[in-house]
Amino acid sequence: MGPDEANDIAQPGSGWRRWLVRALLVLLALILSGLAYVWTTRDRIAGDLIDDALAESGVEARYDIASIGPRRQIIENVVIGDPAAPDLTIGRVVAVVGYGFGAPSIDRIELTNPRLFGSLRGGKLSFGALDPLIFAESEEPQALPSIDVTIAGGGARIETDYGPVGAFFEGAGRIDDGFAGKLAVTAPGAGVEGCSAAVATAYGEVAMEDGAPRFTGPVRLRQVACNGASVDRIDIAAQLGADADLAKLDASLDVMARGLGSGGGSARELSGTARLSLGSDALVLEHDLTARGVATDYAQFGSLGADGSLRSARGLTQSSWNAQITGEGVAIGTGAQEALADARAAGAGTLAEALLAKLERNLVPATRAAELEGSVVWRQSDTAQSIVIPEARLYSTEGETLLALSRFSWRPGMEGNGEGALSGNFLTG
């Protein structure tokens, strides 16, 4: 037995230790070789990761790789769409990469100076090359990705049938829950068919809460024209929210409007509160609004208030409005006086002539600063509509009842259904 063999017997297990050391050295060499390969080919690996992420969404992009590290990958000059008229540009993108047992994943994205371009034509919204990503059909429930995003100096421009819409935005947080930032929007000439505003702006805070977007801030409209009516300016303190799939919109609004006018009258200002809930086939609007300096052909009001609600259902084909009406500084207008005179002349020789003559004598001189209280119900469907005044009273400044209505209703004739019907009770002082 030689000395080496004696030594191996004297130290059992020393052989496998040598093999273990050798194996570890080989493994370490392989790891170092692999790391060296990864480092020398890091640009291609990063490019593959970015390209794979874009390819999954059906989007092609041009970009420059600025820096690649184990955790942070930076690309610049990102262009999606036609370089001459891009759909999205981003000055700088920082992707924070996470490594696990599976493939690498992007844990956080930082965007600097992103610019989004789109169009809204004929009711169709498009962002060009981004449409496969934004409007992709999926059997999975619609949801935002659970990824942290930081946006600095973001902007957007949407071309519409009524002019461009521009936006500025910035913020940070997990995009599906916890994102918070600021949004500013300006839209000269914004509107829909029949209605437009010379200037429309909004500025406020935006947030994502459990997949649902929120907006809080002022909305301002100037020189609004809508189907023959006009408003010089509207200022709204708005709180807007939607559910995660954007199927329902809720809004809480504090409203101040000035310079209101239409073919039937005008008002110096309108102020109050409103709460709106809008779904796919239903609408609920609760309001408490007061108009001041109201003038019509039939009456003038120092103030005229309406506290009630509007409800529509079945795709907005059925609607009803219920409100309590109050008025101060009420005066009968020339249009009402002429209508009374015409009605009295038409009823010559009947009991109506005497009643209307009494109404003219007593009502018109007394209503210089009268007060009004009452309720009104309006209902409308595809085939009929009606206006009902369950009860209303007009008081003089001394508290005397000048005119009282009860169970008063007007059902205008619909097309092909005659001239309508008027019924109810009235009492004059």
Image: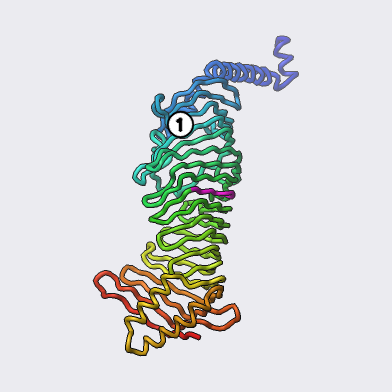
| Picture residue at 52% right of the left edge, 35% below the top | 155
**Res 127 → quadrant:** top left
Q: Residue furthest top?
A: 2
Q: Which of 157 and 270 is in front in this view?
A: 270
Q: Mark 1 Cα within 10 Å, few/some/many (few <14, many 20+)?
A: many
Q: Position of residue 60 (x, y in %)?
A: 41, 29
Our reading of the magenta stretch's main secondary structure is strand
Q: Which residue lies furthest to the left in this view?
A: 416
**Res 290 → quadrant:** bottom right
Residue 100 shows in the view? no
Q: Give the range drawn in magenta.
A: 215-222
Q: Is mark 1 on a helix, strand or loop?
A: strand
Q: Where is residue 367 in the image (x, y as percent from the top left)?
A: 52, 76
Left or right for 417, reference 275 = left
The three-letter amino acid code for the residue at tag 1 is Leu
Q: Which residue lies furthest to the right in this view?
A: 10
Taking the magenta stretch, the answer to whether it contains residue 258 is no
Please tell me whether residue 248 is drawn above or below residue 176 in the rendered image: below
Q: Quadrant of the N terminus?
A: top right
Please tell me whether residue 7 is drawn above or below residue 115 in the rendered image: above
| Picture residue at 54% right of the left edge, 76% below the top | 373
Q: Which of 25 and 88 is in front in this view?
A: 88
Task: Give the residue pinned by disc 1.
Answer: 88
Taking the magenta stretch, the answer to whether it contains residue 221 is yes
Judging from the image, the colouring scheme is: rainbow
Q: Position of residue 23 (x, y in %)?
A: 62, 19
Q: Where is residue 159 in the image (x, y as percent from the top left)?
A: 41, 38
